[in-house]
Amino acid sequence: MGFSRLPTDFYEAIGKLFYAVAMADRSFMKDEKKEIVNLVAEHWSEKLFYKDADELVYQSIRASIAEEQKSQEAFSIFKAYYLLNGLLFTKEIKKVLLEDTNAIGSSYSKRNKSESAMYAQLYLLFTK
């Protein structure tokens, strides 16, 4: 599945969100990385004008790793993007993002307290 006509910074924001969920417990596990790769391939791979959407997601995650960004900081960046660009987030996109973040949080020994709290923040953001 793909969502066409989304701006490049949308995919960068998705990278911040996925990083935030994976790092909620302060560790980015191999199983979480694999799950992100699978989900990006399934839901967020588009051929854009100058770059592939999946590479934008991965670049965003790599930048967060390089900056040693805290999970909550990455989530705050995603949240700010969402609040400024809410019309891009259709019901279907929100549904997929909730499913994807749940899958990331559950990929390594099921979802823990930190990942559950991050998921709850996203759910509340989307249902305001």
Image (tube, rainbow, N blue to C red):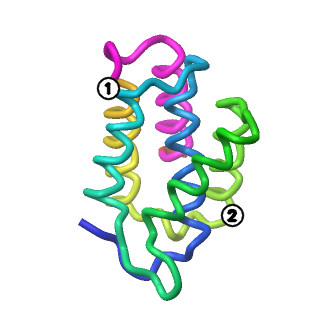
Judge whether 71 appears above or below 113 on screen: below
Q: Secondary structure at mark 2?
A: helix
Q: Secondary structure at mark 1?
A: loop
Q: Position of residue 35 (x, y in %)?
A: 32, 38
- Towards the viewer: 111 or 68: 68
Judge whether 24 appears above or below 79 on screen: above
CA–CA distance in space, label 2 to label 1: 30 Å
| Magenta residue span | 108-126
- Towards the viewer: 68 or 123: 68
Identify which residue is drawn at 41% across, 64% down: 90
Q: Nearer the viewer, mark 2 or mark 1?
A: 1
Asked which quadrant contains residue 109, the reply is top left
- Let me know if residue 106 is in the magenta part: no
Instruction: Identify residue for label 1.
Output: 107
Judge whether 65 appears above or below 1 on screen: above
Identify which residue is drawn at 71% across, 30% down: 70
Q: Amino acid at mark 2?
A: Leu
- Horizontally, is 14 left or right of 105 in the view? right
